[in-house]
Image (cartoon, helix red, strand yellow):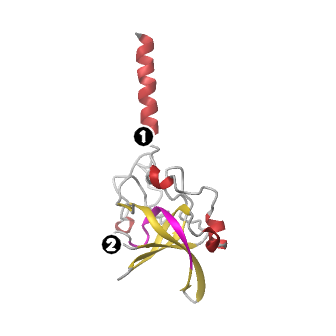
């Protein structure tokens, strides 16, 4: 009887710990991804990987909608094991994510984090400020937009522990937006 309770507890704890590690991109889309292709390789020779699928993420820089579809300009950021962009202060460059569908600029707005799986379509040269920049271009297969607190309105009080009595960001040391999961729209092109 005692062993049965212990085994049930172990199964319950294992289930709870695994449920927190769910990936935001479907298994079907992730199965298409070639994990050997890094962003650095893609940035260097985008035409060499045309037709391959990659998983990338980052911060939306801009969105452009036309009669033929939508284009997101994204600053690349490394992803953790669940697909969430990790350090938004480190990037290897930018890429374009295109879609034949309309991507609403109120959802896919600048400063939002995204994770996507896309098919490499080549490259596109466009200006960034006063320089010509070569963007790898991906056709979106599936994309996930991470929801964030609106940090422009201030710190989301009440202050979470362990800072309940001391707010380290009070004196201007604000690290950026507070990202949390798993809210946000998911777009899939099957």
Residue 19 is labelled as 1
Mark 1 or mark 2, earlier in chain? 1
Image side of residue 125 versus residue 59, left or right? right
Rendering coords of residue 44 (x, y %) = 67, 72
Q: Per the image, is 186 magenta?
A: no
Q: Is residue 164 left or right of residue 122?
A: left
Residue tagged 2: 106
Question: Which region is colored magenta?
Answer: 109-123
Residue at x 32%, y 72% (from the top left corner): 106
Residue at horizontal 55 percent and vertical 60 percent from the top: 87
Q: Quadrant of the N terminus?
A: top left
Give the number of callouts: 2
- Most foreground residue, 97 or 109: 97
Q: Is residue 162 above or below residue 70?
A: above
| Residue farthest to the top, as pictured | 1
Measured as percent of width and height from the top left, residue 17 is found at 46, 36
Mark 2 closeness class: few <14, some 14–19, many ≥20 residues within 10 Å = few
- The residue tagged with tag 1: helix, strand or loop? helix
State the residue at coordinates (53%, 64%): 88
Task: Identify the residue at horizontal 58%, vertical 70% (top origin).
Answer: 50
Image quadrant holding the C terminus, namely bottom left
Quarter of the image holding residue 130? Answer: bottom right
110 in the magenta segment: yes
Residue 108, above or below 85 = below
Could you say where residue 23 lies in the image, as x and y percent from the top left? Answer: 46, 49
Main SS of the magenta part reads: strand
Crowding near pointer 1: few (<14 within 10 Å), some, many (20+)?
few
């Amino acid at each position: 009887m005692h062993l049965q309770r212990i085994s049930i507890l172990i199964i319950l704890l294992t289930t709870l710990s695994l449920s927190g590690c769910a990936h935001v991109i479907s298994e079907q889309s992730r199965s298409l991804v070639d994990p050997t292709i890094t962003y650095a390789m893609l940035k260097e020779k985008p035409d060499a990987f045309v037709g391959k699928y990659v998983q990338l993420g980052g911060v939306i820089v801009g969105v452009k909608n036309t009669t033929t579809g939508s284009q997101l300009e994204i600053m690349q950021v490394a992803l953790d094991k669940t697909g969430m962009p990790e350090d938004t202060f480190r990037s290897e460059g930018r890429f374009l994510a295109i879609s034949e569908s309309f991507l609403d600029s109120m959802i896919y707005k600048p400063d939002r984090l995204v994770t996507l799986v896309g098919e490499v379509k080549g490259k596109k040269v466009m200006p960034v400020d006063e320089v010509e920049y070569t963007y790898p271009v991906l056709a979106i297969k599936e994309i996930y937009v991470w929801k964030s607190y609106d940090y422009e309105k201030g710190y989301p009080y009440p202050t979470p522990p362990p800072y309940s009595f001391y707010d380290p960001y009070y004196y201007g040391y604000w690290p950026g937006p507070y990202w949390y999961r798993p809210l946000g729209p998911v777009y899939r092109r099957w």
